[in-house]
Image: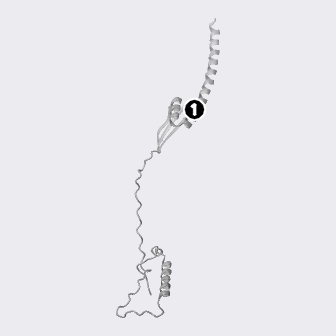
Amino acid sequence: MFYDHGRVEPEAQRGNENVQADTLVEQEDQVDAVAPAEPVQQDEAAPAAPPKQEEATPAAKPAKPRAAKSTAKKTRTVELTLTVTGTADGEWQADLVHGTKRVVQGLSISAAAVSKAAKELHEDIAGGIEEVIEAARSQHRTRMEELEAELAKVKAALAELSED
């Protein structure tokens, strides 16, 4: 019988013994198909070496190829969260968090500073903030008109009292 001991099937390397046995049977069938009808005589002076039992020895694991090291520069990111909060009255506050550490909390900032910073960041941000600031302006104008009317009444009442 002919055994090809130098060649190991890839499936056998993974430890699948059934596939190895099937492969040897296939090799025997191929040899039998090509072999002459008469038995081949072996030289009695040189005894044949017994075939190696591949099933008894564990299959060697192929070395894993090492991944190529990336030449890309690793970028270190910094997580900062700035939260700007505004009220309808036009009062603005800022909170700043670095990672999980609160750096600034409840810092009062002017509406003008918020508007300027928003315009520097992006026009979509500026548009949204400008709407809030405009609503606060409108509310303050209305309140100012009410206070001016009340002031006019108080001045008139004071003038009446002064005519004595």
Toward the left, the furthest residue is 45
Badge 1 amino acid: Glu
Mark 1 neighbour class, 10 Å CA radius: few under 14, some 14 to 19, many 20 or more: some
Question: In the rendered view of the protein, which quadrant contains the C terminus?
Answer: top right
User: Is 154 on the left-hand or right-hand side of 79?
Assistant: right
In the rendered view, would you say 74 is above or below 64? above
Rendered residue at 49%/80% (across/down): 23
Rendered residue at 61%/27% (across/down): 138
Q: Tell me residue 112's x, y (percent).
A: 52, 29
Rendered residue at 41%/73% (across/down): 60
Label 1 sits on a secondary structure element that is helix
Question: In the rendered view of the protein, which quadrant contains the N terminus?
Answer: bottom left
In the rendered view, would you say 24 is above or below 153? below
User: Is 66 on the left-hand or right-hand side of 121?
Assistant: left
Q: In front: 24, or 142?
A: 24
User: Is 149 on the left-hand or right-hand side of 95?
Assistant: right
Q: Which coloring applies here?
A: one colour
Q: Tell me residue 78's x, y (percent).
A: 45, 45
Q: Which residue is mark 1?
A: 130
